[in-house]
Amino acid sequence: MESQLHLVLASASPRRRELLVQAGVSFEVAGPALPELDDMMDKLPPGQQAEALAYFKARAVWDRDPTRWVLGADTIVAAGGRVLGKPRDRQHAREILCALAGTRHAVITGLALLGPATRLIASDNTFVTMRKLSGAEIEEYLDSGQWAGKAGAYGIQEIADRFVTQVEGSFSNVMGLPLELLDRMLHQVLAGKENHA
């Protein structure tokens, strides 16, 4: 993926930074000064929740300088009609992992790309099948600390990949940044700029 746009990433996620570097995207980081808004989103379907959170993050940074191109992203996990965000603590992470074990669940990342006279918002949906986990496996994973700060309390790019039996869709989406969707959004922006040249 190559982009002529220099992006401002409105996220503190090291995984998103790594993915943008791997994709060859020029960017800088400006973490949004925005509290988690999960409680306000409960009435929205999962995809709209992820998109709204991504938009609020991007908007918090974009408002400081509307001439920049700002990318916001937010990832949630949905299973059994419930939206599972980031765990508050170890006990909450345990509850989330117990709820996901043995299920096929959705990992949804919303993206918001804001720029001069431009607002693109979309989301990608990947289905992940996780095998059943023993209590000992869950506790071992909790001991690793890799659940912290991750939607669904696991990171597929780390040791939790051994829990996953199938991924249907974008792997980078499960890591928190669907590169295929971002590529389409960037092409749409660049095509629009060319049409207005």
Image: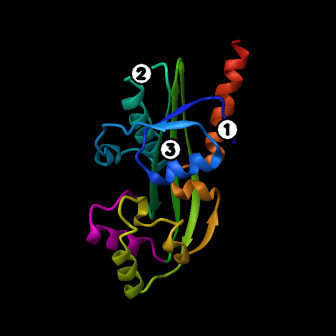
Of the pair 38 and 89, the residue shown nearer to us: 89
Q: Residue extending furthest top?
A: 197
Disc 1, SS: helix
* Disc assigned to residue 110: 3
Q: Amino acid at mark 1?
A: Arg
Disc 3, SS: strand
Place residue 161 in its image quadrant: bottom right
Q: Is residue 46 above or below residue 155?
A: above
Determine which residue is flagged by label 1: 184
What's the distance in space between the residues labelled 2 and 1, CA to CA? 24 Å
- Horizontal side of 14 relative to 93 (left or right) equals right
**Label 2: few (<14), some or many (≥20) within 10 Å?**
few
Which circle's residue, 3 or 2, is located before the other in the chain? Answer: 2
Place residue 195 in its image quadrant: top right
**Label 3: few (<14), some or many (≥20) within 10 Å?**
many
Say whether residue 7 is magenta: no
* Disc assigned to residue 65: 2
Q: Amino acid at mark 3?
A: Gly
Disc 2, SS: loop
User: Which one is closest to the eye, mark 3 or mark 2?
Assistant: 2
**Label 1: few (<14), some or many (≥20) within 10 Å?**
few
- Horizontal side of 64 relative to 71 (left or right) equals left
Q: Quadrant of the N terminus?
A: top right
**Label 1 close to label 3 by CB (< 8 Å):** no
